[in-house]
Image (cartoon, rainbow, N blue to C red):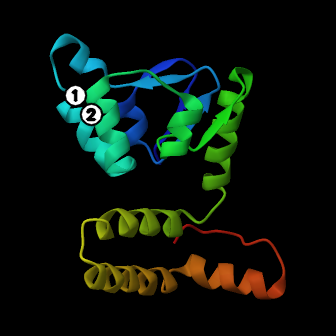
């Protein structure tokens, strides 16, 4: 999984490329290339996939520092926390993800990423295929059984 923890000024391409971002209240995000006569073309690829078009264009065209709270509002950052809580929060998220079925997480992430580039009908068909593949995994049977029995699942990651 891709998880970033930012405590200071961060180039936005890294944040936009990650699945989850935890930022300090003091963190700032920017695409400053335009300030020196270079458009941030490659960061724009990641930004275009992470935030709404107008937010990405504002960052790319103006090159201004974006405070963490604004980055969160536009969808570039998931959580904004005090500086001392950045690493513990990021680690807690990573541990929470790691406590899930690796099969479900991997299949889900692969399916989610693949469907984004597809037309709606094709995306639903692809998502359905991923769901069927996930249902055939041992962990799905364990998870459903654990839910019905009201117990914690014991993942085998298969």
| Label 1 element class | loop
Q: Residue at x 54, y 17 (%)?
A: 8
Picture layout, residue 41 above or below residue 103: above
Instruction: Tell which residue pokes out farthest to the top in this image.
Output: 36
User: Residue 90's spot in the image, x, y percent?
Assistant: 63, 37
Picture layout, residue 86 above or below residue 51: above
| Front residue (pair 134, 56) | 56
Position of residue 24 in the picture relative to residue 131 (left or right): right
User: Residue 97's spot in the image, x, y percent?
Assistant: 61, 54
| Label 2 element class | helix
Indicate which disc residue 78 carries: none
Quadrant of the rendered image containing residue 24? top right
Density class for disc 2 (Cα within 10 Å; few <14, some 14-19, many ≥20) is many
Give the distance between the C-alpha atoms of the residues marked 1 and 2, in whole angstroms.
Answer: 5 Å
Badge 2 is on which residue?
A: 43
Please tell me how many numbered marks the rendered image carries: 2
| Front residue (pair 114, 81) | 81
| Front residue (pair 123, 109) | 123
Q: Residue at x 65, y 46 (%)?
A: 93
Position of residue 150 in the picture relative to residue 50 (left or right): right
Tag 1 near tag 2, CB within 8 Å: yes
Q: Residue at x 39, y 86 (%)?
A: 128
Picture layout, residue 135 above or below residue 105: below
Quadrant of the rendered image containing residue 156? bottom right
Density class for disc 1 (Cα within 10 Å; few <14, some 14-19, many ≥20) is some
User: Residue 106's spot in the image, x, y percent?
Assistant: 45, 63
Q: Residue at x 38, y 48 (%)?
A: 50
Badge 1 is on which residue?
A: 40
């Amino acid at each position: 999984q891709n998880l970033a923890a930012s405590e200071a000024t961060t180039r936005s391409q890294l944040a936009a490329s990650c699945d989850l971002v935890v930022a300090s209240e003091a963190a700032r995000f920017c695409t400053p290339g335009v300030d020196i006569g270079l458009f941030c073309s490659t960061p724009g690829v990641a930004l275009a996939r992470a935030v709404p078009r107008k937010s990405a264009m504002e960052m790319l065209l103006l090159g201004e520092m974006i405070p963490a709270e604004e980055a969160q509002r536009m969808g570039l950052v998931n959580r904004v926390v005090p500086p001392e809580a950045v690493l513990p929060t990021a680690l807690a998220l990573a541990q929470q993800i790691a406590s899930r079925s690796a099969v479900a997480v991997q299949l889900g992430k692969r399916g989610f990423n693949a469907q984004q580039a597809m037309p709606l009908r094709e995306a639903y068909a692809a998502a359905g295929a991923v769901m069927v593949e996930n249902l055939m995994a041992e962990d799905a049977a364990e998870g459903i059984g654990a839910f019905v029995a009201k117990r914690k699942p014991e993942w085998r990651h298969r």
